[in-house]
Amino acid sequence: MSINQSTKPVTTIRNGNLQIGGCNLVELAKQYGTPLYVMDEQTIRGICREYKQSFSNCKNIVMTYASKALCNMTIAKIIAQEGFGFDAVSAGELYVLNKAGVNMKKVTFNGNNKTEEEIDIALSYGIGLFSVDNFHEAELLNKLSASKGIVTDILIRITPGIECHTHDYIKTGQINSKFGFDLSQTEKIVELIVKEYKNLNLKGLHAHVGSQIFESECYKDEIDVLVRELANINSKFGLNMSILNIGGGLGVKYTEDDTPLSVEKFSNAIADGLSTAQIKYNIRDLTLFIEPGRSIVSTAGVTLYTIGSSKITSDGKKYIAVDGGMADNPRPSMYQAKYSAEIANDTAGRIEQTVTIAGRYCESGDILINDILLPEVFAGDILCVFNTGAYNRSMASNYNQTRKPAMVLVNNSQSDMIVNRESFEDLIALEKVPDRLSK
Ligand SMILES: *Cc1c(COP(=O)(O)O)cnc(C)c1O
């Protein structure tokens, strides 16, 4: 089974307690406090290796990790060691990747509104590729490249008009998306690049059809559209574009109801779609880029919480409250995302019951998990929520002036703090009270 097809990293039980990476989760909670993000290094490396293995038949393949899923120096180092490049969507992500020692030539810069400052920073890092999203950016990037006397390699981001079955907010490839050029605009932008933007070098096309995708058909459809466009543009403008970046989006298994493709099925569908399209449109030797984010880090991550208060409503609904919630994991309140969880400490002899896991934030919508079957839960128990490696820490906030949790990396029975828990001082570190109020 592919790692992304499991609801959790490899776990073992020791003295009734749950362990990941040989580390007892109850002891981690005690040592580092809760809420606590825990990342399992072997799970991250394992999925990276599955990707490499599954795509090893592709002659020209470049895999870049979508940093926005989880971006810190340790995670970047691990993924770089596995041979991946990166894509970034802000100067902040570029900064972190650079500080992690990532080869910036292996970085692609994405995003629908890169600012002038960000483009300038990206150029000074010498990143490998820009995915140009819109007319404004093309003009700006050309101008800034010219002012530095360089020619910048670019892809253009296309909206291929593909509908995938996923949540509306995480769907990006459909016609009315905010991202990219739609097909009626591609020739216009190519013409501008070819005729006027002499400091841009067009290397290929890019699209991303959405996230948490379970089906292979939309990737085949996407590849068909992209290869058709690429062949068409190459012949019309006498170009030699050879990069096809099909984005990320492979899903993961948050609950038993989720049925993501294995990495192997995903790679087979892509190889199949690519060879079909290359024959159909009579084009050869394309270099394929894929940009997985969620599937690389999600399953490797869990979040530990301490159970506090509970309540039973007059109609019998039982709420259990934890010491975190929407600020460390905004996905349930934002996308109605579902998660699975277990009690990490010994629950031998307890009867199972259905409960709703509530967060501690001042919003009725701050519910982490609706109606989950757990052994009877008591204050002080440690709840382990699975599949929180992607889009949790990276989307976290300080709502209610809570401190963002620490992150710990586990491997071989060893745990290392890789991101400190924020301190109270951190909460006011950027504040300045005007002098006149201090009198
Ligand atoms: C978000 C994003 C990805 C990664 O998507 P996942 O679903 O996390 O794999 C890849 N490419 C682009 C352009 C994106 O915006």
Image (cartoon, rainbow, N blue to C red):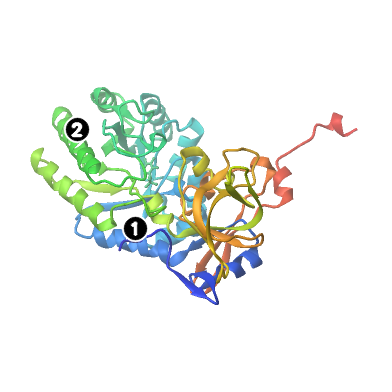
* The image quarter in which residue 434 lies: top right
Q: Residue at x 41, y 32 (%)?
A: 112
- In the picture, the quarter occupied by the N terminus is bottom left
Q: Residues within 10 Å of mark 2 (few under 14, many from 20)?
A: some
User: Residue visible at 74% across and 49% down?
Assistant: 425
Classify residue 185 as left or right of residue 29. left
Whether residue 101 is visible here, answered yes or no, is: no
Q: Is residue 203 left or right of residue 415?
A: left
Q: Which residue is mark 2?
A: 229
Q: Position of residue 211 (x, y in %)?
A: 36, 43
Frontmost residue, 320 versus 43: 320
Q: Is residue 422 left or right of residue 366?
A: right
Whichever of callouts 2 and 1 sits on the residue coming sooner in the sequence is 1
Question: Looking at the image, which is closer to me, 183 or 4?
Answer: 4
- The residue nearer to you, when weighing 127 against 270, is 270
Residue beneath disc 1:
5
**Rendering coords of residue 208 (x, y %):** 32, 39
Identify the residue at horizontal 37%, vertical 60% (top origin). Answer: 6
Find numbered disc 1 in the image and state the secondary structure of the residue it sits on: helix
Q: Quadrant of residue 264?
A: bottom left
Q: Which quadrant of the render holds ligand 1? A: top left
Number of marks drawn: 2
